Image (tube, grey):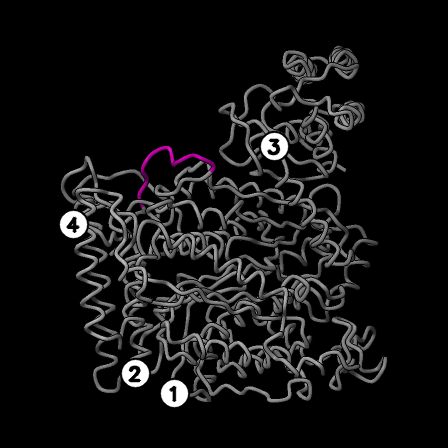
Amino acid sequence: AGERIPKRKEKGQPRQLLSVFCSLTADGQRAPKQAYWPLSPLRMAKETLFPIGEVEEQEVQHAYDNLWREFSADAAALREAHEKDSSLPVYLESMLLLLQRYTWCVPSSYYRALPDVSLYDHSRTTAALAVCLLGKNEATLDQVLRALEQWHEARKKNHSAPMPDELEETKAALLVGGDISGVQDFIYTITARGATSALRGRSFYLQLLTEAVARFVLRRLNLPITNLLYQGGGGFYLLARPSDQDELEKVQRDVSLILLAHHRGDLYLALEAVSLAVADFYDGRISGKWRELGERLQKAKQRRFAELGDKLNSLFQPEGHGGNEERECQVCGREHPGTTDKGAKDNPVRKCPPCRSYESLGDSLRRARYLWLAQVEPSVPENPLETTPRGWDEVLVAFGMQARVGENLKQISKQILKAGSSYWILALKDEALNDLKPDSRTVVGRRFLVNVTPTYETADALWLRQQPREVQKTLRRELPQEPEGKVKPFTLLEAQSTGVKRLGVLRMDVDDLGKLFAEGFGDNATLSRVAALSFAISLFFEGWVEVLAERIGKTEDGQQRLYSIYSGGDDLFFVGSWDAVVELARAIRADLTSFAARHPGVHASAGIALVGGKYPLYQAAKDAGVAEGQAKSLRWRGGDGRMRRKDAVSFLGRALGWRLFGMEDCEVEGLGSTHQLAHRLERMVKPKENKGEGVPQALLHALIRLYEMYETAAEHRRRLGEDRTQVGEEQAYWGPWMWRGYYFLKRMAGRYKGSTGKAIADLADSLHGERFRAIEWIGLAARWAELLVR
């Protein structure tokens, strides 16, 4: 076990699993103190999922007793189900999911070693490596073991003892990576017609497609599920045998043929591998291999479908019927012989079978509690462009996987009767897992999926009846026939915003994640640690984000105002009422800090765009991406005085570090954060009958004008290169906004008595005391408040 790190000072046995984030170095920093995963079966609850400090020995023993009792009962039930009629792959994957549930928080290294790798992550990577070593020459393995023992003995005397040649030359495995490209264009480049259901369907289909392709590769290489190290975010990593290289090239060709047949070049899988020698499992060398694999995948994506050779020629031939409008899909823009205009009589929309299938999948996800998968025989087309593109389910079947989602087990049972010999039923909610029982044909377990879909319910109907007549008339035209339980159109989410009626579009991802994997563990990098970090990040973005979105998106009246388009890997994309989207971004960033053991180097950046409900989605996604890029290019000073990069959010065209912007649990001295000030200003300018203080909105307009005056002057200085000191720090800038702002606010304060006048005077004094340094973000707060009350 190459990840064992001897403890230098501690004695005795560690009792809890150290968070993997405590072993990371990022931005030149470490976690402030050690934090441990709670000893509890895995579920989406804060008390289970978020690291804690050390607990008393008696409490630890009680937690281990509970874990063992529950695991033993489930393992016994699994054994009993397989005693008479067993399938080894089904048993193996069911046991792997049990290990994930119960040993994700149990340290694998339990005596005189750093306990930062779970028994689950250690066991699955050990099993993967065992498969790769199976069949190797026994004499070669004995020689390698002797060389390892001699090297370990030599390192006790000299830590820099060179690696023996046998370890450098003996190939142990292939590290294989798959990455689907074209994902963003596939999801976003559709028209608004039927977009709400189709968006979620397309996104979920891509997650299923990633899994189908990963399992297709495992099946072709005759590898068990343990060899799949990670899957998510449109990519996967697995461990294969050194002898599998030739077969991998054939697999790449077959995957390309299937994707070309059904997606006509829109989606492509880059599949690459790097060889791992025995020596690469030590001294952090695995990091270099991850980096090398990433570089190969990037190069492969630049020569898409090159592996098809002569078959590429047909890719550049004309398709369709030369502009047959009747066969052109009004959602994706492609010609298809199956395009029809079935739908509402008063507003028919021509849609191709694939687009209709994505909408159907999106509708099925509304209340889905279970995911059902079945293994079938794959089918690879010899002439892909002679194949008519089909729906999402038939693409998965081509890769050897059937899939369905359902709300209850009765729906699942009907589907199982038509399935092959092996299938999976995976609970999409914690409570749904309690109803699953194993049998010899069924893999059962938990699948984490952010599935937040706003549907039209009774609360929405009541809300709509309270709106002005013209608003009702406009919105009802956008609703489908019999809207109860259907996915809300974007126009309704827009209308349910607080203040100004806009959609919010959020894109967000972890900063420098590739660097974290490649460099974060230093010489202590191992396959198990990388797997543990991948699993932890997936738990957050594929599990906990759903909990946050469900809580923040729901109003007191029961309306859901957030729509998860995608959340997986390390990034996410949400659409919803603009004020709910902003609050979601704040909560995600704050909880990421808590989840990552308060590591200052683990952070995320976000971009938020505000658009109308009929604004083209592809452009909205692009706008949010530009905003995210603006956030990632920011340099700012943190509360500790250090200059920081990224870890920021861009909102209303202005990028700010999260501390100034105001994520949850974040306090800023003086005026408070931008978020705090925006809501303070909102309360000030609200009419008294709406529980406000009745200050004229001229206050907001004045602050915005002051900021615009400042920004014009600041932009001029930036062009001249006069905005920073000689050491590169931002330089305070004196200007007329200082005395004009102070004078205006003091005069306004004099017009009001009591708490209102005092609030305005306090605002003026705070600005003046800070030499108006905060003008930069006070302008943003004023614009934010203006949107909330408009």
Labels 2 & 1 near each other (Cβ < 8 A): yes
Q: Earlier in the sequence, mark 2 or mark 4?
A: 2
Q: Residue furthest left?
A: 12
**Residue 343 screen position, x and y as percent:** 75, 77
Q: Earlier in the sequence, mark 1 or mark 4?
A: 4
Q: What amino acid type should be assigned to the residue bearing mark 2?
A: Ser
Describe residue 534's horizontal placement relative to residue 480 as left or right: left
Describe residue 678's horizontal placement relative to residue 451 as left or right: right
Task: Identify the secondary structure beneath mark 2.
Answer: loop
Q: Quadrant of residue 757?
A: top right
Task: Identify the secondary structure beneath mark 1.
Answer: loop
Relative vertical location of residue 225 with respect to residue 292 in this rendering, above or below:
below
**Residue 312 screen position, x and y as percent:** 67, 80
Q: CA distance from mark 3 to mark 1?
A: 56 Å
On residue 371, which mark appears? Answer: none
The residue that disc 2 covers is 87
Q: Earlier in the sequence, mark 3 or mark 2?
A: 2
Describe residue 138's horizontal placement relative to residue 399 as left or right: left
Labels 1 & 4 near each other (Cβ < 8 A): no
Q: What amino acid type should be assigned to the residue bearing mark 4?
A: Glu
The residue that disc 1 covers is 421
Q: Earlier in the sequence, mark 4 or mark 3?
A: 4
The residue that disc 3 covers is 635
> Which-is-in-front pick, marks 4 and 3?
4
**Residue 774 screen position, x and y as percent:** 66, 22
